[in-house]
Amino acid sequence: MRTEEMIASAIKHGEKFLVVSHMNPDGDAIGSSIGLSLVLESMGKRVFTYNESAVPALYRFIPHSQRITQELPREEVDVTFVLDCSTEERVGEKFKEFAGKGLVVVADHHPPSAPMEGLHLIRTDASATAELIYDILAELDVPLSPESATALYVAIMTDTGSFKFSNTTSRALEVAAQLLSFGANHRLIVEHIYESFPPERFRLMAMALGTLHFLKEGKVASVWVTRSMFQEARANDEMTEGFVDIPRSIRGVEVAMLLREKDGCDIRVNLRSRGKVDVADIASRFGGGGHPNAAGCTLKGSLIEAEECLLKALEEAMG
């Protein structure tokens, strides 16, 4: 029996479901969670949707985004879906301690790293986890509402960089077209994700671009955002979404880095590659992960120290 069939069977026979995704969720984690939860509820199931982190303001326009809570159920469920990650650590400590998970179903498109026990639907060739959710729902032959289709479309659209990244496959476009046929609101998504930025974001962007510098004879471009920049621009971390794609777009740059000062000594890093360098491998050396062309991690120390560590790893990878 195919994995999709086994998952569909578990859905048919289950009554109570928990849907979770990784901390600090992105568009795929949020869209996949909401899309799956809405369809399960339309089938008469009881569904709890959880994330240790609050939904970023950028994605609160998604219909029913408020259903994602920071509280786990107080009862055992029949099935737990773990989306866009494969380990308990990525979901968070509260989830690790939750004893009522039931059957665990992992749906992810990242390279697996010691995934949880249970059913695994892991395909690294998928554009987004939402593509896998769509395949599961197709196995069930249940219709999608415009709201669930919109949520899944957000996931695919954001993880493909508005269909610009190399993971934009014919299958990704096929699923996106099907979601549009179910009523996904393309215009709503474009307006909220790409055309409704607050002024503070652009003040912060101007400061960040002032730090742009090139390394490795122009093959690496790095941008920093300091705590003082956040304060001066009256901006928050969510407003740095997409900053790393600016240096990546510069001719000759193979790898772009965005380094952001967080609380304490943490430096949050976003990495982007044009394809020659596997930045997921780089990020994994520092406890992070992601995709070959888009990854992230957190380092300790100063911005300079973090950049030096990354550059050393990049030099080994680039030769």
Image (tube, helix red, strand yellow):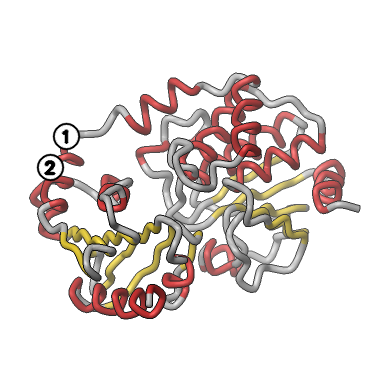
Q: Which mark is residue 199?
A: 1
Residue 291 spot, x, y in % from top left: 50, 59
Left or right side of 117 for 19: left
Q: Considering only vertical position in the picture, is 296 above or below 14?
A: below
For image coordinates 47% across by 73% down, the residue present is 284
Residue 125 spot, x, y in % from top left: 63, 52
Circle 1 Cα neighbour tier, 10 Å, few/some/many (<14 / 14–19 / ≥20): few
Is mark 1 in CB contact (under 8 Å) with mark 2?
Answer: yes
Q: Nearer the viewer, residue 12 or 203?
A: 203
Residue 245 spot, x, y in % from top left: 32, 48
Q: Where on the picture, by quarter, is residue 287?
A: bottom left
Q: Where on the picture, by quarter, is residue 282?
A: bottom left
Q: Nearer the viewer, residue 218 or 284?
A: 218
Q: Amino acid at mark 2?
A: Arg
Q: Give the CA distance from mark 1 to mark 2.
A: 7 Å
Circle 2 Cα neighbour tier, 10 Å, few/some/many (<14 / 14–19 / ≥20): some
- Look at the image and tell me in which quarter the C terminus lies: bottom left
User: Which secondary structure lies at badge 2?
Assistant: helix
For image coordinates 74% across by 37% down, the residue present is 137
Q: Which mark is residue 203?
A: 2
Q: Nearer the viewer, residue 268 or 211?
A: 211
